[in-house]
Image: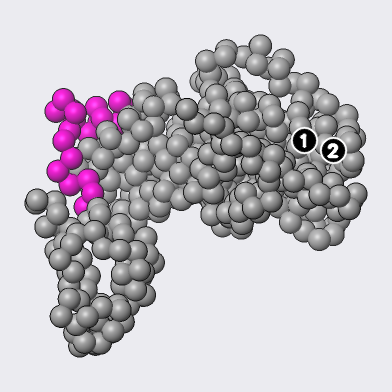
Amino acid sequence: MGDRMNRQERLYKLLDLARTYRGWSRKELARALGRDPAHVYPDTDNPKIDFLVALADALEWPLDAVVEYLWVGLSPEAGREVPGGMTFDELDRQVMELEQRGEHTKALEHIRAMHSLARTPLEHARACRRECSAWDGLGRYSKSLAAAQLGLRQRPLPHEFQLVLQALMANAHYALGDLTPAIGIASCVIDWFARHVPDSLQGEATHAFAHYVRGNSQREMIGSTDGQDGACEWASRAQADLATACRLYQEAGERHDREDFRAVANTCAGGLLDVEVELGKRDANETVDVLLAGVPTAQTAAPRDRSDWVESWAWWCVFAGGIALRRLDGARLQQVVAVASGTLLELADRLDNWALRQRALLMQHHANEKLARQSGLRFDATIDDEDMRIIAGTMGRFPGFRPVGWRILESAKVVRNEIV
């Protein structure tokens, strides 16, 4: 009952705020909301969607901001029970261990407790950093971005920690396909380290990560330019950053004996093969074979329980598919994309990684579109219930994917699994 009244009270506060903001009378507010003036304040804590849409329009707020305030309130972390009476630092260590094991949902419960215990700007920012990583692990990149942004709004913060959050924010933009802000924010971090040599492991990791994000964002820009000159310019920039990131991660991996750093260096090496094709330094067919042949070899050579290595080789599949889409045609394109996307989906399922699932779906869709243009024939996908689940989950996590997702769902042949 108390929670219901709290939510209802929040709804009434929003209605009062809308009246004040617009300078409306009760009757004018009712007209805007499509309600009877006598019942403009509903006797419910669960208003219908048309009411919420009209209220958001009256406030000139995004709909999700209205929904978030009604269902969460101002302080979602307030009063969160702290597991076992742990301190903030103990929770921080526990969350780090949970995230290393891939238990991101459980980590978020502890992170909410971290927020409730945080007393200083740095502690609030540290909780935001953990939250950013947890949402990233769950493939919720919009929430990861919001957590990084919230952390950066804490004042004051040590500059080194600001750089960490900026790098994480750049990565969230990269994951969402917002390449221009990803490049710009990563450049700010890189510019700082051009003038200040990192003197800690955190600084070394942030420096390398910023080059990784900017390099891959520039690599993704290759296909966005109409003209070979523009593509080569992006490829040259990507090559420089990915080579730097590869070197920094390799050196840090050896210096600190960090297997995760070695895995990211391997990802950068795969990205370099991709851009070297664009720069005319490598043959497309041969490079695709090198990338795809490397994947099972690496799965055998690297510890199977290390998710960082599995993810690295999954990105080699992404690079192979990207080369095929830009450089190959006909049966060869179809064959490469089938192998690359199929392997990629298997690895994505092992990691429960939505970014990789999105890449596999886009790879398949763009290959079908290219083959249709070249042959004049339709290459519509055949999907089942599991495919629909993946498409729906990807549409929810990647706003830019939604138009593609709808085109797939509307054109594909659907094979429904019989429910017993």
Residue 242 appears in view: no
Q: Position of residue 394 (x, y in %)?
A: 54, 44
Whether 350 is among the magenta residues is no
Residue 182 vertical position relative to residue 418 in the rendered view, above or below: below
**Please, which residue is most extreme toward the front here?**
420
Quarter-of-image position of residue 216: top right
- Please tell me which residue lies in front, 167 or 359: 359
Name which residue lies at 14% across and 43% down.
Answer: 79
Q: Position of residue 123 (x, y in %)?
A: 27, 42
**Please, which residue is most extreme toward the left here?**
2
Q: Amino acid at mark 2?
A: Leu
Quarter-of-image position of residue 44: bottom left
From the viewer's perspective, is 257 left or right of 222?
A: left
Q: Amino acid at mark 1?
A: Val
Whether 76 is among the magenta residues is yes
Name which residue lies at 81% across and 32% down.
Answer: 336
- As helix, strand or loop, the secondary structure at mark 1 comes to helix
Assess whether mark 2 and mark 1 are in contact (beta carbons under 8 angstroms): yes
Residue 5 appears in view: yes
Name which residue lies at 30% across and 25% down.
Answer: 94
Q: How many marks?
A: 2
Q: For marks 1 and 2, give the CA distance.
A: 6 Å
Q: Which residue is labeled 1 in the image?
A: 337
From the viewer's perspective, is 105 left or right of 293?
A: left
- Please tell me which residue lies in front, 204 or 391: 391
- Please tell me which residue lies in front, 117 or 104: 104
- Identify the disc placed on residue 333: 2
| Residues packed near mark 1 inside 10 Å, few (<14), some (14 to 19) or many (20 plus) | many
Magenta segment boundaries in residue numbering: 75-94
Q: Position of residue 277 (x, y in %)?
A: 84, 39
